[in-house]
């Protein structure tokens, strides 16, 4: 018996020593990463894992929102004897916010297996004289990362735009300004009229402002994978690129398969007006609601009933009357809905189920109005 | 000295062969000096024009490494120089030019001696002052240089520059692949300073592999051709870019080694840099041309 325990103990200790590796293997196997992302051969072994070189375009699994990342980063990893420049103060949050419109975290963090954020210096050697030429050295990697965008939109970008001179006397103001810094507001077009050449109707009038303020779309809902150079270009004039698939952005909400004429017309269309189109005004309670929270059956935007209960389940125990703007007092909160709302049009209220004629709505309120 | 004399005669013969359109001598019979020296281990530089940002720090560093007054590094940010298409000269062994790579994009390319595997300049030098070293560098011996300027004409890239400003004993100068620095184990000055590592220093054969890896990983970024892999028999400096550099940044060159100077002179130099005047005479014509070139360069 004792022998068995000893053997088991021995096995356990042995297994500990290799557990780290097995763990990471198990993790990787679970992670829905294609083996070919890291290994070139079909059967990698421990002796010959046949790892490919840094899989720049393939592996990025850590994602978080810009606010979860650091606000700024001081880049001071490259030091030479006679440094011309101070360390670089990099506005990380600002850049990650902008990256939401252009490729996300992976546009810089191009290689990040599960776990911590991998620093550039973990893969890119500080030494330029080296044998592995497959990736730039650290200095090259940093500069390329920045200049790939910054040079592509402005060939005049200068060292001093990022590097403050060591000799400069002035105290750095960059760092203090950084937390409040964000991309200047983009001048958005009110409307764009596309001449599509389509038989279904040549003109598509796209009201950009409506999609932002009325339909509450975020910039990134449509602009998710654009390069900075699409707006910022080395040359003065920026032509807006022709959308490769013009329907791609629209089809998330609109039925672009069967319903052409809602967008394609022979004339410019008037701005959207929910009341005119449907007889239901969004103004009072629904102006902040996204379209699809009511129009849940994707594709079409018709078929909803004006009655509140076609969307709202007021019978629900959890219903908070306060969302209507009227918070019920302790007495009325105990009532059944139908005690006051005798019809299914909930804007109508009758008090006479319980009260005499001298109590009417809205002269007397069953609670407090916002 | 007899060796040099024989080289000289070979060179003359080579020029005569193509220039005079005498086809009796096959170009292969006239070999440039020193290909037998070529080492598998020879070094090179991969210039990636899609990465170069045109900061010209390489120009500053190169001058500094060759005792040429190089001034303040920040002055090199001046973009005005890009208005003219420059050539390396006695004062700038390397220069960076800006070119239009597409409708939206400006790219930059650094030029210097290509350190040809079969250097025409070496063949052209009548006193044997220029030689190709095992490590790839094409270097020259100032003491031997007699200032005849044949190498200038022979070079398909129009690299060797002449110290025209010197009244006494003017010599030829060009990029020497930072021979002194590399012998001390340092990187060439330009490759060491480049902020974006647009210049990758390494074994030529490794650089070719690396260039092809970049093509494969990023096919949209590159025009899939390594300039210098085969041109005139191969060069130590290799170029990749987003468009074909042959015929724009570089002359269009044959893949055959410059046999002495014959092929390259016709296809390269005259087709591109120098007005295609009748260059069917021998040395007299060549001397005349170098003078003419001085003007075209706008020095
Ligand atoms: S580029 Fe010209 S100077 Fe340089 S090695 Fe070749 S032939 Fe000689
Ligand atoms: S290798 Fe040396 S000499 Fe040649 S361009 Fe670079 S710095 Fe100048
Ligand atoms: S230092 Fe590098 S990036 Fe700057 S101009 Fe020279 S090659 Fe281009």
Image: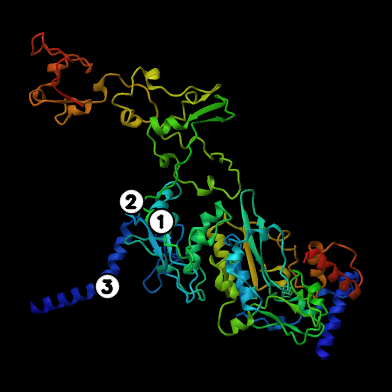
Farthest residue to the front: give it: A169
**Camera-side residue of B260 and A122:** A122
Quarter containing ligand 2? Answer: bottom right
Q: Earlier in the sequence, mark 3 or mark 1?
A: 3
Q: Nearer the viewer, mark 2 or mark 1?
A: 1
Which residue in the structure is indicated by mark 2? Answer: A67
Instruction: Please say whether residue B208 is visible from this viewpoint.
Output: no
Quarter of image, res B188: bottom right
Q: Are marks 3 and 1 in contact (CB under 8 Å)?
A: no
Name the disc covering residue A18, or none. 3
Q: Residue at the spot x=58%, y=61% of the render?
A: B53
**Camera-side residue of A22 and B38:** B38
Name the disc covering residue A91, or none. 1
Instruction: Look at the numbered disc 3 and say if its residue's Cβ is closer than 8 Å to ligand 3.
Output: no
Taking the image as shown, residue B261 lies to the left or right of residue A357, namely right
Q: CA distance from mark 2 to mark 1?
A: 12 Å
Q: CA distance from mark 2 to mark 3?
A: 37 Å
Q: Residue at the spot x=74%, y=69% of the render?
A: B157
Quarter of image, res A211: top left
Q: Residue at the spot x=31%, y=53% of the render?
A: A68
Question: Image height check: is B13 above or below A109?
Answer: below
Q: Chain of mark 2?
A: A
Question: Image height check: is A150 above or below A279?
Answer: below
Farthest residue to the top: give it: A357
Q: Residue at the spot x=75%, y=74% of the render?
A: B160
Quarter of the image with the C terminus of chain B is bottom right
Q: Are marks 2 and 1 in contact (CB under 8 Å)?
A: no
Query: Helix, strand or loop at disc 2?
Result: helix
Q: CA distance from mark 3 to mark 1?
A: 41 Å
Asked if badges 2 and 1 are on one and the same chain, I answer yes
């Amino acid at each position: 018996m004792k022998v068995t325990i000893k053997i088991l103990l021995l096995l356990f200790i042995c297994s500990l020593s290799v557990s780290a590796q097995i763990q990471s293997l198990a993790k990787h196997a679970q992670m829905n990463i294609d083996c070919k992302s890291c290994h070139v051969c079909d059967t990698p072994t421990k002796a010959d894992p046949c790892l490919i070189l840094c899989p720049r375009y393939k592996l990025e699994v850590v994602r978080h929102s810009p606010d979860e990342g650091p606000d700024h980063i001081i880049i001071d990893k490259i030091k030479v004897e006679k440094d011309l420049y101070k360390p670089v103060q990099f506005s990380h949050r600002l850049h990650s916010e902008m990256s939401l419109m252009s490729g996300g975290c992976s546009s810089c963090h191009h290689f990040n297996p599960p776990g911590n954020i991998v620093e550039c210096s973990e893969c890119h050697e500080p030494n330029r004289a080296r044998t592995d030429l497959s990736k730039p050295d650290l200095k090259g990697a940093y500069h390329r990362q920045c200049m790939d965008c910054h040079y592509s939109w402005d060939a005049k970008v200068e060292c001093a735009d990022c590097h403050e001179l060591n000799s400069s006397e002035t105290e750095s103001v960059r760092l203090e300004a950084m937390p409040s810094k964000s991309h200047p507001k983009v001048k958005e077009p009110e409307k764009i009229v596309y001449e599509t050449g389509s038989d279904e109707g040549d003109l598509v009038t796209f009201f950009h402002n409506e999609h932002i303020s009325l339909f509450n779309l975020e910039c990134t809902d449509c602009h998710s994978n654009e390069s900075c150079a699409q707006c910022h270009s080395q040359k003065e004039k920026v032509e807006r690129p022709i959308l490769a698939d013009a329907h791609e952005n629209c089809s998330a909400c609109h039925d672009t398969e069967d319903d052409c004429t809602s967008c394609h017309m022979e004339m410019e269309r008037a701005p959207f007006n929910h009341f005119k189109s449907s007889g239901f005004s969004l103004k009072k309670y629904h102006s902040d609601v996204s379209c699809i929270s009511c129009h849940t059956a994707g594709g079409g935007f018709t078929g909803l009933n004006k009655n509140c209960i076609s969307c709202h389940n007021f019978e629900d125990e959890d219903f908070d009357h306060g969302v209507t703007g009227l918070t019920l007092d302790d007495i009325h909160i105990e009532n059944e809905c139908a005690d006051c709302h005798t019809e299914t049009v909930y804007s109508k209220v009758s008090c006479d189920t319980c009260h005499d004629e001298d109590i009417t709505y809205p002269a007397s309120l069953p609670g407090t109005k916002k | 000295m007899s060796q040099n004399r024989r080289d000289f005669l070979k060179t003359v013969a080579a020029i005569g062969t193509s220039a005079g359109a005498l086809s009796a001598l096959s170009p292969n019979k006239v070999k440039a000096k020193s290909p037998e020296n070529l080492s598998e281990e020879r070094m090179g530089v991969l210039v990636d024009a899609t990465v170069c940002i045109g900061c010209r720090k390489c120009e500053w560093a190169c001058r500094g490494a060759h005792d040429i007054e190089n001034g303040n590094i920040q002055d090199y940010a001046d973009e005005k120089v890009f208005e003219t298409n420059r050539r390396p000269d006695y004062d700038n062994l390397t220069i960076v030019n800006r070119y239009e790579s597409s409708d939206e994009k400006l790219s930059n390319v650094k030029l210097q001696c290509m350190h040809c595997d079969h250097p025409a300049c070496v063949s052209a030098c009548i006193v044997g002052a220029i030689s190709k070293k095992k490590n790839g560098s094409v270097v020259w011996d100032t003491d031997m240089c007699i200032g005849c300027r044949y190498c200038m004409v022979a070079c398909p890239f129009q690299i060797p520059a002449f110290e025209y400003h010197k009244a006494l004993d003017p010599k030829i100068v060009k990029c020497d692949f930072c021979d002194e620095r590399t012998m001390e184990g340092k990187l060439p000055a330009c490759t060491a300073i480049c902020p974006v590592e647009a210049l990758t220093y390494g074994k030529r054969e490794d650089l070719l592999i690396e260039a092809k890896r970049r093509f494969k990983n990023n096919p949209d970024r590159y025009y899939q051709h390594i300039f210098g892999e085969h041109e005139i028999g191969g060069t130590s400096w290799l170029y990749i870019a987003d468009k074909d550099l042959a015929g724009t940044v570089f002359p269009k060159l044959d893949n055959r080694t410059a046999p002495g100077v014959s092929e390259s002179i016709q296809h390269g130099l005259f087709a591109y840099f120098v007005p295609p005047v009748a260059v069917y005479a021998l040395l007299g014509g060549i001397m005349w041309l170098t003078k003419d070139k001085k003007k075209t360069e706008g020095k």
